[in-house]
Amino acid sequence: MRRSRELLFNRDTQKLELLLTPLNRLGVTLEGCELAEAIRLARTDMKRAGLTKLQPQFYLSTGYGTITGSTSIALGFYDCAPLLKDLNEEFRGFRYSFEDVVNIVRHEVGHAFAYAYKLYRRKDFREMFKVRGNYFTTYPVTNRYVERANPWSRDYVNPNGDHYAQKHPDDDFAETFSVWLQPDYDWREVYKLYPGALRKLEFVEQLVKELRREEPLIDQRLVAWEPLEEFKLPLAKFLSARTSAYRRKATGYIDPELKELFWKSPTPRNGRRRERDYALADNFIRNHKRNIVQQVSRWVGTGDTVVKDLLDKCSARARALDLWVRKDAREKKLVELTSFVSYRCALFALNDSYVNGHHK
C-alpha cells in the first residue's frame, strides 16, 4: 500500500472513525458479509428439510433475536465487518466465529418456525417443552437462568456448552431445532444417552414433517423492531468504549476539520425540503475532486495520488458523518476545502505525514 493511503486508512484511524460514527451511518448491510453467507446456509438447511413455506425475514439491529410472534429475525451489526468484530471483542469481550453465527441463525429460525405455526398453542408442544402460563410474558429478562441450570440434566440439548436451552421453553425448542437442522449431524447417536433431549429432537422432526407443506398462520412480511437505522448513538457509546488510545495513533483522522467545514444534518428552513438549500458534502467533494487535484498538486508540488487519497478520505467521512454544504455558500466552501487539502498535502510533502503533531 502506498504511503498516503497507509496514513489515511490505517487500522487505528479506521477504528477511531468507526467508534465516532453513529450506528445508523456505519454503512453496513447484509449483502456480501459473513451474515449473508450464514443466512444462505440456513436457508439451504431449511430447503433440505422441506421447510419451503417458512420465509423468515432478516435485518440488522444491535443484537440477535426473533421478533416476538413473527418470522422477522434481527442480526447483530457487529458481525458485518472484521473491524467491527475486533472492536466488539475488545470492548464487550466476545467474538462469534462464523460457525457460531450460523448456529445462531439456525436457532433464530427455530423461533420463527415456532411463531409461524403458533406451536405454543398446541397441547403436545406445551407438554413436551413444559410450557407453563403465557409463552411470551414468562420469558426471563436476564440471563440468571445460568444460576439454576442443571449441568447434569439429560433433558436438554447443549450444543454450545452454555445450557441455553434451560433458559425458557422458547429457547429449549429453538436450541433443539437448531441441532436437528444441522446437516450431516447424527443427533440420534450424539444424544442416545440423553432420553429427554432425544424425545424433543424426534418431536421436532415430527413437527417439521407435519407442517412443512402448510402455510404459516401469520403474515411473514418484515416487522422490524429497533432496526439499526433508528440508532443515532455513536458506536463508542454502544460499546462503552474509550477512544483516547486510538486518537493518538490515528494518522488519518480528519473528522473535526470536516465538521468545521460543513454542516451536520441541517434543519430545513421555512418548511422547505433540505435539498433545496443544501447539498451533500460527499457529492460536493466528488464534484470538485478533479479541479482540486489539479490545483493542489500544481501549487503544493505533491503527486496527484497524494491529493486524491486525501479527497477520497474527505468524501468517505463526509458521507459517514452525514455532512452537508449550503448551496449559497458553495464558492466559499470550495476555497476552504481547497485550502484545507493544500495544507494537509503540504504537511505530507514536508513531513511524510498528513498531521502536524498528535490529536488530543
Image: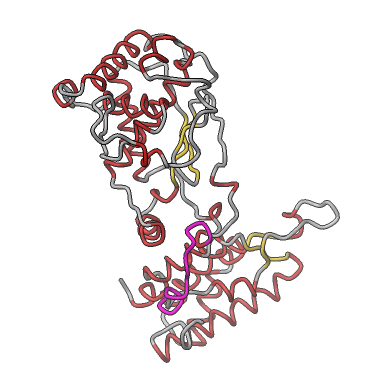
Q: Looking at this view, is 76 or 251 the one in front?
A: 76
Q: Which residues are magenta?
A: 237-249
Residue 334 is one of the magenta-drawn residues: no
Residue 10: x and y, percent? 37, 71
Q: Quadrant of residue 13?
A: bottom left
Residue 108 against residue 252 in the figure, above or below: above
Q: Tell me the quadrant of the picture where the N terminus can be found.
A: bottom left
Q: Residue at x 59, y 76 (%)?
A: 257
Q: Looking at this view, is 88 or 22 the one in front?
A: 88
Residue 138: x and y, percent? 51, 28
Q: Looking at this view, is 354 or 28 the one in front?
A: 28
Q: Looking at this view, is 313 or 355 the one in front?
A: 355
Q: Main secondary structure of the magenta part?
A: helix
Residue 149: x and y, percent? 33, 36
Q: Residue at x 33, y 37 (%)?
A: 38
Scheme of colours in the image: secondary structure
| In-image side of 227 versus 171 (left or right) | right
Residue 241 is one of the magenta-drawn residues: yes
Q: Residue at x 70, y 73 (%)?
A: 331
Q: Residue at x 48, y 88 (%)?
A: 356
Q: Residue furthest left?
A: 189
Residue 209: x and y, percent? 32, 10
